[in-house]
Image (tube, rainbow, N blue to C red):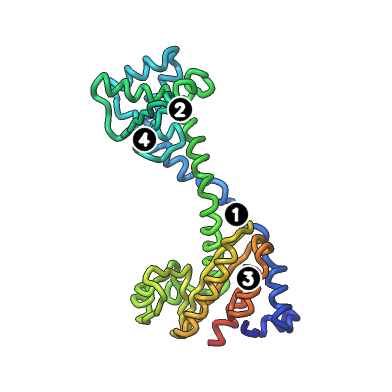
Amino acid sequence: MKQLSFYKKNGLNTDQEVFNYFMETMITTNRTWEYFINWDKVFSGADKYRNELMILNSLCESRFPEEELKSLLKKTPDVIKVFPLLLAVRDESISLLDSSSLSHFKFYDYDFNKTPSTEKEIDFFVKFFKKSGLKNLIKSKKITNIYDYVIGVEAGLDSNGRKNRGGTIMESLVKKMLEDIYNLDDSNFTDQGTPKKVKELWDIDLPVDKTSRRGDFIVNKNNKIYWIETNFYSAGGSKLKSTAGEYKALYNYFKQKNVQFIWITDGGGWKSAESAIEETFIATDYIFNLKMIQDKILDEVFSLN
């Protein structure tokens, strides 16, 4: 661990005191208002099929939705493309196993981009409507507007992206700090940096251990390159230990190549993997949390090298 005057100013005189400060000043959540649902994506997903969904609304008003669907498919067969979405599925084709007979399995392949044109093909998709439970849903009268129902489906599907949004939010927070606190701009830093990007921006050859390596941020201060990785862990798990080990190895690699490696991480998840991150914290130069970045610790780092 590299000693910094920042630590002395905060009364931290030993490696252990610095590490304790790092752990104690971690935040418990990085959830912002944008974390819960990406509403633009939700409405965009529903609007993509607005016409088809409005056509299917007639099923909600029918006493005989199965017969009504047959009639609709003869007039506007492409409404089948929304069937998977009605079941909260993104796939455009679905393979199914019919296990009603244990002595003889049946398999069905549905391609919802292929519009039915014959009576047999129409019946095939009506069977899907019936067997998948969509008929019972419509017949129950629990929904009165299929477009509104799909907005709910899209919101549910979007909630699956919260784990990825947590990482994206962390990157956004760090990017805003680099811009607003450290006054970095397009001339001296880039996000999702690659050796090719560094070469194009600053005519510097950046060595990496594998060609697919991409840094969350790469900063160029006086032709000195800083490779920055960010992540946030709100919960523990075995991944944290392997992450700490991976970044320790990455630090050692970049040190040999004269590239400064900075790891910005935070979150209560590290409480359950304290020994793993402590080992990496002591063995590397720069591991910081958001509070430390907020308090301008990088000003000193950038001035040292």
Exactly how many numbered labels are in the figure?
A: 4
Label 1 neighbourhood size at 10 Å, few (<14), some (14-19), many (20+)? few
Sooner in the amino-acid sequence: mark 4 or mark 2:
4
Q: Give residue 32's mark.
A: 1
Please identify the residue farthest to the top as the structure is shown.
63
Asked if labels 2 and 1 touch by Cβ distance under 8 angstroms, the answer is no
For the residues labelled 1 and 3, the Cα–Cα distance comes to 25 Å
Give me the C-alpha separation between circle 4 and circle 3. Answer: 45 Å
Taking 46 as reference, is 172 above or below it? Answer: below
Q: Between disc 1 and disc 3, whose residue precedes?
A: 1
Looking at the rendered structure, the kind of residue marked 2 is Ile
Upstream in the sequence, badge 4 or badge 3? Answer: 4
The mark lying in front, picked from 4 and 2, is 4
Residue in the foreground of this view, choosing between 61 and 134: 134
Q: Is residue 270 shown left or right of residue 70?
A: right
Q: Position of residue 195 (x, y in %)?
A: 38, 75
Q: Which mark is residue 95?
A: 4
Give the residue pinned by disc 2: 146
Q: Is residue 252 above or below residue 217?
A: below
Q: Position of residue 94 (x, y in %)?
A: 37, 36
Between the residue at mark 4 and the residue at mark 2, the CA separation in whole angstroms equals 24 Å
Mark 4 vs mark 1: give the one in front: 4
Query: Residue at image x 41%, y 40%?
Result: 90
Quadrant containing the N terminus is bottom right
Mark 4 or mark 3, whichever is nearer to me: 4
Point 50% across, 75% down: residue: 250
